Image (cartoon, grey):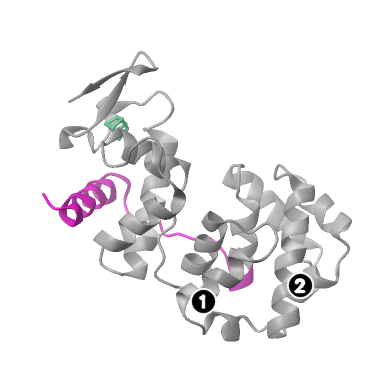
């Protein structure tokens, strides 16, 4: 199978198993951007609590976050971990969008993908995973989001070496998959579902829809050194 056929076969199996994931939850573009920052290193249920706190106090608006004191935002997003840092990131993003675009997100997302990506990556605290999540899920741009689950699963599948950078992984998906926003959207969501429910630290291979692909590098008794190739 070519790389494209392999990637599409993996997606087909995940889609059949989990169903369409309907990402990303959020009523507005800005809410999705806020969620992309808050979700780092924390479960989505905690992000929802933080987003509800912001909503209830009228602070789930770009301009409101721009004007609110950082300490107040930090208290409201306390259910997410590293809330002081995340409050600082929200202020940095809101500040950039207000100062450069007058808070007009349509104008911001009107630019080409790579230009926008560079702008986001230059904002304090925005790393590639957050930038790509914002671009794909809030902006509808065809960029592929990768994360720790992607690295773990595709390494176990024998597709990525253990040492692989974010940009190498993103580049691989973008090179071998058709450039399709809907596909990129759901593919990442499927990977998260597999990593969260099945391909955990200790994988449940017998339940995995990818098991019969016959490419997996399995762990034995959780010892990384003791691997077999199926
Ligand atoms: S077969 Fe096992 S190791 Fe491979 S992707 Fe599935 S759960 Fe992970």
Q: From the top left corner, tell me how far across and down residue 208 is, in percent.
A: 27, 33
Instruction: Report helix, strand or loop for mark 2.
Output: helix
Q: Is residue 213 visible?
A: yes
How packed is label 2: few (under 14 Cα within 10 Å), some, or many (20 or more)?
A: many
Camera-side residue of 135 and 122? 122
Q: From the top left corner, tell me how far across and down residue 29 is, in percent.
A: 58, 72
**Magenta region includes residue 81:** no
Query: For residue 173, which quarter of the picture?
Result: bottom left
- Tell me which secondary structure the magenta stretch mostly adopts: helix
Taking 2 as reference, is 18 left or right? right
Q: Which residue is mark 1?
A: 115
- Residue at the image point whose x is 30% and y is 69% from the top: 179
Spot the residue most to the left.
Answer: 1
Camera-side residue of 55 and 94? 94
Quadrant where the C terminus is found in the figure: top left
- Residue at the image point whose x is 25% and y is 25% from the top: 206
Query: For residue 180, which quarter of the picture?
Result: bottom left
Q: Which residue is mark 2?
A: 95
165 to 122, vertically: above or below: above
Q: From the top left corner, tell me how far across and down residue 106 is, in percent.
A: 57, 84
Instruction: Report helix, strand or loop for mark 1.
Output: helix
Taking 142 as reference, is 159 left or right? left
Between discs 1 and 2, the one toward the N terminus: 2
Query: For residue 92, which quarter of the picture?
Result: bottom right
**Magenta region includes residue 25:** yes
How packed is label 1: few (under 14 Cα within 10 Å), some, or many (20 or more)?
A: few
Q: Which residues are magenta?
A: 1-30
- Residue at the image point whose x is 50% and y is 62% from the top: 132
* Label 2, ligand 1: CB separation under 8 Å: no
Camera-side residue of 52 and 182? 182
- Residue at the image point whose x is 21% and y is 55% from the top: 8
Quarter containing ligand 1?
A: top left
């Amino acid at each position: 199978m070519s790389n494209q056929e392999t990637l599409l076969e993996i997606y087909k199996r995940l889609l059949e198993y989990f169903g369409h994931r309907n990402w990303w939850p959020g009523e507005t573009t800005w809410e999705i951007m806020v969620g992309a920052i808050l979700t780092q290193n924390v479960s989505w249920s905690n992000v929802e609590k933080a987003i509800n706190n912001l909503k209830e106090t009228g602070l789930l608006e770009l301009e409101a976050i721009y004007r609110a004191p950082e300490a107040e935002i930090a208290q409201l997003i306390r259910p997410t971990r590293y809330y002081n840092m995340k409050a600082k990131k929200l202020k940095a993003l809101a500040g950039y969008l207000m100062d450069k675009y007058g808070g007009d997100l349509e104008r911001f997302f009107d630019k080409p993908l790579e230009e926008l990506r560079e702008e986001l990556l230059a904002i304090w605290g925005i790393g590639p995973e957050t930038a790509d999540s914002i671009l794909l899920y809030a902006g509808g741009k065809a960029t592929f989001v990768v994360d720790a689950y992607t690295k773990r699963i595709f390494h176990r599948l024998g597709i990525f070496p253990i040492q692989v950078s974010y940009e190498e992984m993103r580049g691989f998906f973008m090179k071998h998959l058709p450039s399709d926003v809907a596909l990129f959207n759901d593919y990442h969501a499927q990977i998260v579902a597999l990593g969260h429910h099945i391909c955990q630290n200790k994988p449940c291979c017998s339940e995995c829809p990818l098991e019969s692909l016959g490419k997996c590098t399995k762990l034995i008794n959780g010892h990384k050194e003791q691997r077999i190739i199926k």
